[in-house]
Amino acid sequence: MRFIITLFLALLAVQAAFADTADSVKYPPGDGPPPTVFDRVKNAGGADKFDSAAYAIVLDSTVNTINDAGVTYTDGYILYKTLTEEGCKKLAVLTWGYEPLSSMVIVGEVNIVRGDSLIAVDNAAVLDLPAPQSGIYWSDRIKSLQLPRLYVGDGIEVKIKRKGFSYALLDEPSGTAVEDQKYIPPMPGEYFDIVLFESRSPIVEKKYVIKLPSDKRLHSQVYNGPMFSHTGYTDDTTIYSWWVKDVPAWEPERYRPDAGDFLTKVVVATVESWEAKSRWFFDVNESQFDYSDAIKAKVDEILSQAGIA
């Protein structure tokens, strides 16, 4: 009998030891499991915490992976929380803009977080439409998705993928897969971005990550406010991260400067210097004003017929 009791206690001790070892390996001392989407929505708080804002951005995460040609692959994740009925209306339709000549967007997964339930939204209902425009008519488009009826306190979880860049295409360099050629930036192999870390809605957390080949160097500068940052390394990649927490909404004012001139932002570029980028931009555009004798003759003819020349 004594042997059985001793064996039972020994087995309990071994089980406890393995449990402790598993926990200590999984999480550093003092840390617990990462928050779930349900935790984030619940812990975000209500309208009273955010000065009666319509909705809050609970988490906005962007991870950009750049290859040697400068093609950018983006994994985007954003989690909203409705705080008022007005917020339910504002988030009833989600939209994503893109320029098809130089970028693409795929709406991967959309969920409504309601209590302890995750309600999947059918992304087959995504519409691809011409973007509203005026003055200058580019080829911009938007993808939109109508959500089911929302209620105050709902979370909206969105996962998307993008490829490309946000600058006008100048050429299509060779040496890259055909399906990726139009996504190469105008300055092949280089990466530029300006990211604002404030919004018209309050932000609980926002993070922006760049993953670059280890042989590329990045110049960056933070403007108009503090933020967290980190640089990490793997064998073939350098990982740059910037993030902020608990950022209040900003309200526009009459005669204010451009938002990029006073909101917290980070400016990044892989080109060797800002001067080099400016010189390159000047050089590639200067030739657009060249003209041939035939063009000049035709212009003179048109002006003469109009009685101007």
Image (spheres, rainbow, N blue to C red):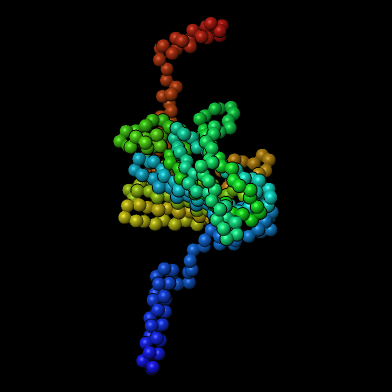
Residue 201: percent from left, percent from top:
62, 49
- Drawn side of residue 282 relative to residue 119, left or right: left
- Drawn side of residue 205 relative to residue 216, left or right: right
Residue 40: percent from left, percent from top:
56, 59
The correct choice, above or below, for 124 with respect to 42 in the image is: above
Residue sitting at 58 percent across and 27 percent down? Answer: 135
Q: In the image shown, does 161 or 10 lie closer to the viewer? A: 10
Q: Is residue 251 visible?
A: no
Quick one: which residue is furthest to the front in this view?
1
The correct choice, above or below, for 213 with respect to 134 in the image is: below
The correct choice, above or below, for 98 with respect to 24 in the image is: above
Residue 53: percent from left, percent from top:
67, 52
Residue sitting at 41 percent across and 82 percent down? Answer: 12
Q: In the image shown, does 21 or 15 lie closer to the viewer? A: 15
The tally of labels here is 0
Quick one: which residue is furthest to the bottom in this view?
2
Q: In the image shown, does 116 or 45 lie closer to the viewer? A: 116
